[in-house]
C-alpha cells in the first residue's frame, strides 16, 4: 500500500462547479489502526472580472499541483486574495508559498493569531469580519460569514453571492468511503471529483461521525447539536445557498438531503 499513501489530485480537477467557481480537490490519506482511508482536502478558486480568491490553501504535500492549477486558471494574472478559513495546516499550509508566488496577494479573514504561525507574511495579512464583502468584479462578490460549525475560535466561512456557494471549512465534513476494506480500492475511480448528487450512494452517517469526532474539537463541549444545525439551516435560507463547498468532502448540491446526515453524524460522534 506504500505507493498510494501520498496525497493525490484527480485529473478531473479543477472542476468548475459554478460560473467562475472552481473546485481543486485532493485525496488525503488517514491512517487508522487497521487500514488507510481517504478524505478530501480541497481548495476553491473564485474568479471575477477584476480579481480572484482562493479559499483555503490545500495541504503542503499538494503544493506542486495547486501551483500548476493556479497557473492554468489564472494565466498571467496574479492571485489577488487568499481566504484561509482557519489556521490549521490543511487550510493554511501553503500560505508562505502563495505569498512567495504572488508577493502582493492579500491574506484576508480573522487574522488575529496568524502572525504567530507565519511571521514572514505579516505585511500580507488583512483582517476581515463577518459582514465584510470583497468585490472581485463582474458581479462576483464574496461575503465573509460567521462560521456556525467551527473547530477553532477564529474560523470563518465565505459565501459567493452571485453563484450561491457557501464555503464551510470543516463544517459539513465527512470521510471518503470508510466502509471499504483492505481488499477494495480506497475510493472508486472518478469518485473524488463528484458532487453529492452524482455519487452512487448517499453519504453514510458513519462518514460524517468519523470526521466530526476527529476534527471538530468545539463539538466536544457543545451539548445542543440540534440548535447548531438549526442555525445553519436558517443561514442557508437567509443567503439562498444552493451549493455547500466543504474543505473535507465532496461538494454538496442537495443541501437539505445531506444536512440531516451530517447532523446525525455529529450526534453519533458525541453520543447525544
Image (tube, grey):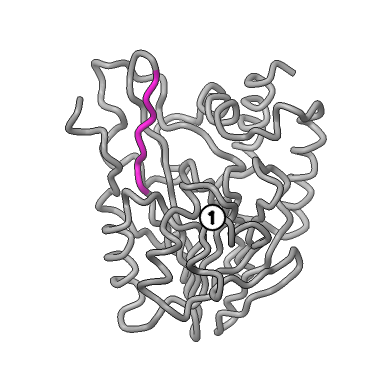
Q: Quadrant of residue 64?
A: bottom left
How far across and how far down the image is residue 201, in percent? 44, 29
Residue at 31%, 65% (x, y): give it.
Answer: 67
Callout 1 secondary element: helix
Residue at 65%, 33% (x, y): give it.
Answer: 217
Q: Quadrant of residue 239?
A: bottom right
Q: Quadrant of residue 14?
A: bottom left
Q: Is residue 270 magenta?
A: no
How far across and how far down the image is residue 37, in percent? 36, 27
Question: Does the magenta stretch mainly form a helix, a strand or a loop?
Answer: strand
How far across and how far down the image is residue 53, in percent? 50, 70
| Pointer 1 residue | 117
Foreground of the two, 6 or 260: 6
Q: Is residue 28 magenta?
A: yes
Residue at 60%, 50% (x, y): give it.
Answer: 168
Residue at 50%, 26% (x, y): give it.
Answer: 207
Highlighted magenta segment, given as a residue range: 26-32
Whether residue 46 is situated above or below residue 154 in the rendered picture: below
Relative to 221, 197 lies left or right:
left
Relative to 157, 36 lies left or right:
left
Quadrant of image for the N terminus? top left
Amino acid at each position: 500500500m506504500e505507493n498510494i499513501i501520498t496525497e493525490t489530485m484527480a485529473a478531473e480537477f479543477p472542476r468548475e462547479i459554478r460560473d467562475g467557481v472552481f473546485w481543486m480537490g485532493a485525496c488525503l490519506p488517514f491512517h487508522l489502526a487497521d487500514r488507510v482511508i481517504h478524505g478530501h482536502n480541497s481548495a476553491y478558486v473564485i474568479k471575477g472580472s477584476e480579481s480572484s480568491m482562493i479559499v483555503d490553501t490545500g495541504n503542503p504535500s499538494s503544493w506542486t499541483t495547486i501551483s500548476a492549477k493556479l497557473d492554468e486558471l489564472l494565466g498571467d494574472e496574479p492571485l489577488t486574495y487568499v481566504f484561509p478559513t482557519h489556521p490549521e495546516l490543511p487550510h493554511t499550509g501553503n500560505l508562505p508559498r502563495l505569498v512567495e508566488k504572488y508577493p502582493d496577494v492579500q491574506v484576508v479573514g480573522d487574522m488575529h493569531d496568524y502572525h504567530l504561525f507565519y511571521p514572514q507574511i505579516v505585511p500580507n495579512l488583512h483582517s476581515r469580519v463577518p459582514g465584510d464583502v470583497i468585490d472581485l468584479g463582474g458581479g462576483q462578490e464574496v461575503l465573509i460569514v460567521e462560521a456556525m460549525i467551527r473547530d477553532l475560535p477564529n474560523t470563518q466561512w465565505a459565501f459567493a453571492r452571485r453563484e450561491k456557494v457557501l464555503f464551510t471549512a470543516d463544517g459539513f465534513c465527512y470521510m471518503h468511503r470508510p466502509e471499504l476494506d483492505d481488499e477494495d480500492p480506497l475510493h472508486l475511480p472518478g469518485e473524488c471529483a463528484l458532487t453529492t448528487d452524482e455519487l452512487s450512494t448517499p453519504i453514510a452517517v458513519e462518514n460524517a461521525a468519523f470526521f466530526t469526532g476527529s476534527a471538530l474539537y468545539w463539538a466536544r463541549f457543545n451539548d445542543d447539536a440540534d440548535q447548531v444545525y438549526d442555525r445553519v439551516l436558517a443561514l442557508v435560507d437567509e443567503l439562498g445557498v444552493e451549493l455547500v463547498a466543504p474543505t473535507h468532502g465532496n461538494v454538496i448540491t442537495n443541501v437539505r438531503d445531506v444536512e440531516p446526515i451530517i447532523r446525525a453524524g455529529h450526534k453519533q460522534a458525541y453520543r447525544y
